[in-house]
């Protein structure tokens, strides 16, 4: 045969390069692992918040920050890609399913953190109010004109400009 048949050309579509598709799928799999890890940390944090376990809550924070930073970096990388539609459909389905559960866990976490913040603010206000009341009720002493201490008078701290 002297002539080769012409290759069939398709217009308007550009197949993804195998290496680029593999790289995208690897990125999505890494994102799945990271979302799962972050979700698990948030679940443990929610449990600690629900049981008012401050020690467990504080122990989780470094792990939570590290997982959140990795999640953010992967999402930035993913959003910069233009070939997301070329990802393996099974991986996209798994990621979509995981993302829905993750969103629910994050919402619960935000609610619990807001409750903790509110409770901490109320406790702080009570402590300050109690401290002020205690300070006001303490016996106060002031010095009289003769230099002797007079019980019950409030002391004034200032400089007199009269000579």
Image (cartoon, rainbow, N blue to C red):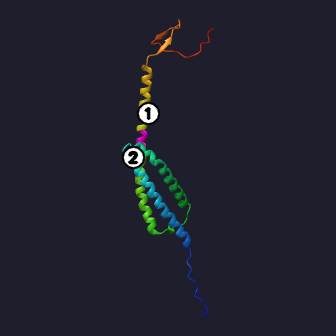
Q: Which of the two residues, 1 or 101, is positioned nearer the viewer here?
A: 101
Residue 91, placed above or below residue 103: below
Q: Residue at x 41, y 34 (%)?
A: 123
Q: Is residue 145 magenta?
A: no
Q: CA distance from mark 1 to mark 2?
A: 21 Å
Element at label 1: helix
Q: Residue at x 49, y 10 (%)?
A: 149
- In the visual, does 53 lie left or right of 27? left
Q: Position of residue 121 (x, y in %)?
A: 44, 36
Q: Which residues are magenta?
A: 114-118
Q: Which residue is mark 2?
A: 48
Q: Nearer the viewer, mark 1 or mark 2?
A: 2
Q: Which of the two residues, 1 or 158, is positioned nearer the viewer here?
A: 158
Q: Which residue is mark 1?
A: 124
Element at label 2: helix
Q: Position of residue 60 (x, y in %)?
A: 45, 48
Q: Residue furthest bottom?
A: 1
Do callouts 1 and 2 mark residues in contact (Cβ within 8 Å)?
no
For disc 1, the neighbor class at 10 Å (few under 14, some 14 to 19, many from 20) is few
């Amino acid at each position: 045969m002297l002539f080769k048949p012409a290759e069939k050309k398709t217009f308007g579509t550009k197949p993804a390069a195998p290496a680029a598709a593999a790289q995208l799928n690897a990125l999505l799999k890494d994102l799945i692992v990271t979302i799962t890890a972050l979700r698990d940390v948030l679940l443990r944090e929610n449990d600690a918040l629900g049981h008012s376990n401050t020690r467990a809550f504080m122990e989780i924070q470094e792990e939570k920050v590290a997982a959140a930073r990795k999640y953010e970096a992967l999402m930035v990388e993913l959003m910069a890609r233009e070939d997301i539609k070329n990802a393996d459909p099974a991986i996209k389905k798994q990621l979509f399913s995981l993302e829905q559960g993750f969103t629910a866990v994050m919402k619960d976490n935000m609610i619990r953190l807001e409750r903790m913040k509110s409770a901490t603010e109320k406790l702080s206000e009570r402590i300050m109010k109690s401290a002020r009341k205690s300070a006001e009720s303490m016996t106060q002493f002031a010095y009289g004109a003769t230099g002797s201490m007079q019980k019950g008078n409030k002391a004034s701290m200032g400089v007199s400009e009269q000579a």
